Every structure is written in C-alpha cells, then in structure tokens.
Amino acid sequence: MFYQLYELNHAMMSPVRAAADATKIYFQNPLNPFTHTQMGRTVAASCELLERVTRRYGKPEFGLDTTLVSGQRVDVLEEVVLRKTFCDLLHFKRDLPQGRAEDPKLLIVAPMSGHFATLLRGTVEALLPDLDVYITDWEDARQVPVAEGKFDLDDYIDYIIEMLEFLGPDTHVLAVCQPSVPVYAAVARMEEQNNPCAPSTMTLMGGPIDTRVAPTAVNDLAIKKGIKWFKRNVIMDVPFPHKGFMRQVYPGFLQLSGFMGMNLDRHMVAHRDFFQHLVEGDGDSAEKHREFYDEYLAVMDMTAEFYLQTVEKVFIEHALPKGELTHHGHLVDPSHITRTAIFTVEGEKDDISGVGQTHAAHTLATKLGDEKRAHYVQPNVGHYGVFNGSRYRSEIAPRIVDFIKSHPKLGCIPVQVERERQRQLAGAAPSAKGSVEEAQTASDIKDSIILEQTEGVVDDLKQITGVGPKLENELNQAGIFHLWQVAALTPEQAQSLDEKLDGRILREGWVEQAKKLTEEG
C-alpha cells in the first residue's frame, strides 16, 4: 500500500500547497507594502520553497526551438516520427540553410531510469548544430494500461533495433548511462545478423557495461540486497485513477529518493541557497535552481519486469561481460561487432558508473579493429557532467561529433570474418586464416570489398597517385589499410568499391600502381 499512501499524502497536501502559493503571490504583489521588506521576501521565499518540495513535477518540455548551423540561426521543429506503446521516437528537424548538405543521423537512446528524456536536453542542444538528432522519449509506465502487455529487457533491445531499421543505414547511436547495455546488445545482434542498418558508430557515455570494474554504491547495493529483496520491497501496483492501474512498476519517486539520498547534503545546501537567493532578490541564481530541479524532480515509473531484469542481469549477474546475456534466448556475442566503431566516454568523478565500467565495451569487442575504437575520460566531472554542463559542451560534444564524422558509414564485413560466420551457421568447423588468394576468391560474398582486417602497421595509401588524405580515410573506412589489399582487388571488387569513389580505381589504375609499389617494397 506504499504507493497508495504516497498518493494519499500528495492529495492531502493539496490545500497546503494552494495556501502557500496564494500567500507567496500576496507577498510578491508590488502593491503590497510588505513586498519590499525583509519580512515580506522571507515569507514569500518560505511559501515558494514549501510549495516546490511538496508538488509533483510533470514531464518537462525540450523547448529547443532554434539552433546555430554554420553560424546561422535556424528553426527546429520537434516531431514524433515513430510511435510505440512504451516509447516515441522524436526528431529535432532543423530548417537547414539552402544548399547545405545533410548531417549524419544520430539516435540518442535516453535512459529509462526514473527521469524523462528531457534530462538530456543539454545533450541534444550541443549536438544539434552538427548532427541530425533523434531521441527515444520513453513513456511513463503508470500511464500505460495493463492491457498493452509487458515491457522487459528483450523488448527494450527490440525497440532499439526497430528504430535503427526505421532510420536506415549510416545512422549513429549514442547511449547515456543505463541504455548502454541494451544498445550494446542490440548492435551485437544486428552485426551477427549482418543487418545493413547496424549503426556506423556507437557512443556509450557513463554506462554500466561491466559493473565489476570500480564498483560504486549503486553496484554494491544491488549485490548486497539481492534480487529477491528488490522484488519484495520496491515493486508496487499503480493505484487508481492512473491509466496503468494495477500494472506492476518500480515507482519513479523511489528512484528519485535513492538518487537524492546519495547526495542528500548537496541537495539540502542547494535548497538553502535557493531560499537565501529569494530573500536577497537574486533572481538569476534562483531561476537556475528552478530550471535544474524542475527537470531533476520530474520522474516516471518503470515496468517491474524491465527494472528487475536490469538489476539482475547488469548489476548482480554481470551477464554481458560474462557472456551470459541473452536476447529472446539467443546468446549476445560482442565478438560479432566488427563494423560499428565504438567511442566510450567516462567522468573522472562518476559515482554511479565508475571509471572503467564503460571502457569494458572495448574489451568485449575482441574482433573490432583499433582504428574503430576511441575512449575519453573527462577530468573533474561526475555522472551528470558526462552528458550535460559546460565541460560536456566544450570538451565531450566536439569529440562525439568528430568521431561520428570520422566514421560516416558502416564498414563492410571482412571476408575472413564473414566466411567464418557462414561456416558456423552451416555447422562447419572453424578454418585457419586464409591467404591473399583465398581472399580474392571471396568476391561472391554480397557487397564485400574488405579483403582482411588491418595487419600490423597501416600502409601509406597516399603513395598511390590520386589518393589523398580524404580518399585514404574512405579506403580505411571500407576496410582497406594495406597496399597489398589494393593490389589483390579483383575486377569485380574494384568495380564495387568504385561505386563509392566515382570510378577512380579503374580510371587511375590504382590496382596496377599498388602492385608496382608492393613489388618495389
């Protein structure tokens, strides 16, 4: 009955909030002589503080109406492009200047951890000038009728895959905190299935990929209590009259209590300073407090099945790093990630996802080339500083944009990896690494133009007349790093690759040049 008591308490406080709000208005009226006195400001500040700490905060708005693109202020239209039962896919459509090329598509997967997607307003705002941004807008579980069915970790992964397929090839994905694990699993499954809509890059920010590394208070609590304790103490039925009446959920107000309890002294000091700013008439500082806590105190419920599976699989069993995580009964194997480039970001003072937990994503992707990896630790920021604030805007966001634009397209599957996968699917035994001649005979694999992954030091492909830094980067993106690879291209492979290079391979004789350079070498 705890949820019902919470609702009852909120209802009983309604008259008190109304009276406090009316009193605040009375003592802020410029016609009231007490308004301009120390006493009047103190009373008004006390009433506002009381009303704010007892109210229920609704879902905030993104409010991103404009952005700067190429130094020009353009309008931004927020539109829903895909509706699902538990999530809407939002698109921030920019009115780009005439003649400007389209920017890379970025899917931001917002955390389903108690707060609404608007918590990432700053994340979106900093990326809008350079990227075509989409974001998952998760639904409050207490507003979803029981008849709509369940929503668990498998469904979460399904949603991510469906959205990436909806956005199409050459899309990039960014996950903040909790969704790092399901996003990682979704990419691994798409790579395993050779899905052409697998993202070109995957950016993971402060995510619990392996919580055995640098465990925090959050990780310790999960292990100490055990999954049975969570089932017994934090799962509740949605009370009447919400749409999700009788749906089992993990209430948002409990999650908020946990977050605030971790830094209770900091929140108490913040509210004390807010009161002082109101009394002193410091409107700017008071407004910053309102903006932050209007967002921070707005919470949503999560379905019980999703919450419990996340606690059990991610924080207790460490299923992903142990190779035990499944998706609809199929084992998630990160070694299948060979084309999607991975960028991980961590905060030096993160007290929710410790330093090293997100970096573990690189350790698990054992077959991903080094040229498709990047990691960054931002000094002097905590968990929220990883995706919001001045350091995020000046240090992290530019790195994300640069990484995405450095890997614009999804690479093709290396021949040897694809052949091994086909053998495994057919039940054949694994084969040893093939020779150059074997790679040449693999041109029958659909759209495959990568002969091998990088072996040792990457060659300077600019030795080929006609290849500059830009074309060298495009060849690297296609999986060609060595002169012998260019020399070994079959006519069919060269023609396939030429479709992206305007026929320059055949026209400028790159294959012949590479053969000569290889012989001279």
Image (cartoon, rainbow, N blue to C red):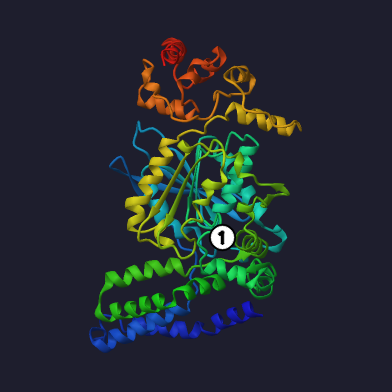
Residue in the image at 41% along x and 45% along y: 400
The residue positioned farthest toward the front in the image shown: 521
> In this rendering, is residue 471 above or below 324?
above
Give the total of numbered labels: 1
- Let me know if residue 63 appears in the view: no
- Quadrant location, the C terminus: top left
Q: In front: 185, or 289?
A: 185
Q: In front: 274, or 339?
A: 339
What residue did someone put label 1 on? 212
Residue in the image at 36% along x and 59% along y: 389
Could you tell me residue 446's position as x and y percent?
62, 23
Could you tell me residue 10's position as x and y percent?
54, 80
Residue in the image at 58% along x and 59% along y: 139
Q: In front: 14, or 422?
A: 422
Q: Which three-letter amino acid code belongs to the residue tagged 1?
A: Arg
Instruction: Say what secondary structure mark 1 lies in.
Output: loop
Could you tell me residue 376's position as x and y percent?
41, 50
- Let me know if residue 176 appears in the view: yes
Residue in the image at 58% along x and 54% along y: 87
Graded by Cα atoms within 10 Å as few (under 14), some (14 to 19) or many (20 or more), the crowding at tag 1 reads many
Q: In front: 314, or 5?
A: 314
> In this rendering, is residue 465 above or below 106?
above
> In this rendering, is residue 22 above or below 72?
below
Q: Is 424 displayed left or right of 356 in the figure?
A: right
